[in-house]
Image (cartoon, rainbow, N blue to C red):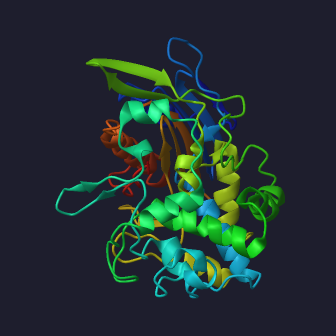
Amino acid sequence: MSVTLTDQDRPELQKAIEEMVDSGFTGVSLRVHDERGEWVGSAGVRELGESATPPTNGHVRIGSNTKTFTATVVLQLVTEGKIGLDAPVADYLPEFGMDRRITVRMLLQHTSGVFNFTGEYYDDGTFAPGIPATTAGQEWVDNRFKTYLPEDLVRLALSKPARFEPGTDWSYANTNYVLARLLIEKVSGRPVAEEMRRLILGPLGLSGTVAPTTRSEIPEPHAHAYYRYEDTGRQQTVDVTRQNPSWISSGGDMISTTQDLHTFISALVGGKLLPAPLLAEMCTPHPKVGYGLGVFVQATDCGGTVITHNGGMAGHAALMYSTPDGSKTLTAALNYVDDAALSLGEAFQKATQRLVKEVFCGGRAGSADAAEPAQ
């Protein structure tokens, strides 16, 4: 089923999301804003065993798209003079005894070198586990309502060897954004959710977006999220729509809708949240992987550029793409059956590349590489 809000039919978009469902996703909701207006559609099911399609503007756990919101708040506090972008993080959070070479900018760009508390994959193929929540299927399911304190996640990460000297390389680490959250709370004197409402959600009217921090509920309407694990030799699939997202903290705990993600990313790149010089710094990519300050900056093979962040969160995922001027956006909500092996990772990559090709390249060959959903 699709809902078309312009005079234009977009069968190629409906076909793309139906193919995503065929590739293994439970359901997909897609929203596209471009020169032809707005198109909204959905495919698949809202809930396993049911026939209803996913809500076209349902709530979804947006995973690492949270990082773009968090980075924006940090940069807004830079604008207010409360944070120095190139100041040592240790000046604000002395209790952790951090390397004084690590700056606020390095947190936002993943160049600090700190260990990723959700586990590190090294170039030689080895894996160093982090918190138990992310390394064992049934253990995560059994403990999905546990509260993790952000300070404890940081302390765990800082107890591990750094990946590299600060500022000398790039490596994606959720720890950077938990530190950014603690930084926000320290300099503002308010919980991160309150600062998010003051600086972004309130001004933009994002009524469908929340920073739940430890709350396990997700507002209605929403599609369901699932997790599969092995128990005594048998595959079990459990509904994990309700979960305490504190295990990922500000690395990926927020909830939003495709409409709110569109409003946010178009306002951000359109200069409504940050002054032009800071927005330019945010969208200046690191040469290794094209990551700016809380966003990926990616060239499309058809000659354009997209500003993006994607995220996955235990059976829910969200996509967020925009042209640099905000004139064309793609936002999507996905529901699926997740597992410890991230079995849908390849399908996620192919599907996002296909959507980017359709929306930003007119279906022509070539697309931006999709960002991995961070777990």
Find residue 324 and report its image quarter. bottom right
Q: Position of residue 124 (x, y in %)?
A: 16, 61
Taking the spot 43% from the left edge, 48% from the top edge, the residue there is 375
Q: Is 72 above or below relative to 36? A: below
Q: Position of residue 251 (x, y in %)?
A: 53, 57
Q: Is residue 161 left or right of residue 278?
A: left
Taking the spot 64% from the left edge, 61% from the top edge, the residue there is 69
Q: Is residue 265 left or right of residue 118?
A: right
Q: Is residue 18 left or right of residue 71?
A: left
Q: Is residue 285 visible?
A: yes
> 129 or 35: nearer the eye?
129
> 34 or 98: nearer the eye?
98
Which residue is outermost to the left? 124
> 230 or 366: nearer the eye?
230
Q: Position of residue 212 (x, y in %)?
A: 69, 46
Q: Is residue 308 visible?
A: no
> 275 or 217: nearer the eye?
217
Q: Position of residue 187 (x, y in %)?
A: 73, 76
The quadrant of the rendering that contains the N terminus is: top right
Taking the spot 68% from the left edge, 38% from the top edge, the residue there is 6
Q: Is 123 above or below relative to 137? A: below
Find residue 145 and report its image quarter. top right
The number of numbered discs placed on residues in the rendered structure image is 0
